[in-house]
Image (cartoon, grey):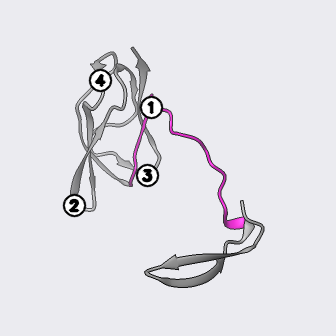
């Protein structure tokens, strides 16, 4: 954390003096819970590929999310079983919205 102290920043051999106001520094929240699959960007759910009780592997595609005319594969970060799917096809989602919960194992 900084206390509004000036810091030197070097970019392409050019030095800049800068400061970061204390109120703009956000606390570290830790790593996200891998059993909670969340939307990383707002968009529309195009396809749901899993259902409650399904076993999934790490890296498996769970959902397709259309964001800005691009399909994004939302994948599992762990091996486990689907506890709940909170969205359906054509649902509009916001950033960080919980989409799927998993149980490890």
The Cα atoms of the two marked residues, 1 and 3, are separated by: 19 Å
Numbered disc in front, either 1 or 3: 1
Report if the CB atoms under discs 2 and 3 are less than 8 Å apart.
Answer: no
| Residue at mark 4 to residue at mark 1: CA–CA distance | 18 Å
64 and 7: which is toward the camera: 7
- Tell me the tag on residue 34: 1
Residue 23's spot in the image, x, y percent?
73, 66
Lower sequence index among marks 2 and 3:
2
Residue 87 quadrant: top left
Q: CA distance from mark 3 to mark 4?
A: 21 Å
- The residue to which callout 3 is attached is 94
Q: Give the numbered dot on residue 51.
A: 4
Which secondary structure, mark 3?
loop
Nearer to the camera, 47 or 27: 27
Mark 4 or 1: in front is: 1
Residue under the point 52% across and 77% down: 10
């Amino acid at each position: 954390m900084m206390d509004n102290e000036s810091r030197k920043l070097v970019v392409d051999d050019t030095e800049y003096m800068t400061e970061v106001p204390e109120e703009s520094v956000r606390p570290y929240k830790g790593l996200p819970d891998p059993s909670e699959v969340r939307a990383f960007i707002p968009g529309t759910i195009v396809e749901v590929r899993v259902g409650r009780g399904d076993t999934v592997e790490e890296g498996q595609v769970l959902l397709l999310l259309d964001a800005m005319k691009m399909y994004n594969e939302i994948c599992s970060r762990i091996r486990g079983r689907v506890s709940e799917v909170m969205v359906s096809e054509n649902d509009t989602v916001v950033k960080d919205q919980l989409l799927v919960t998993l149980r490890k194992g």
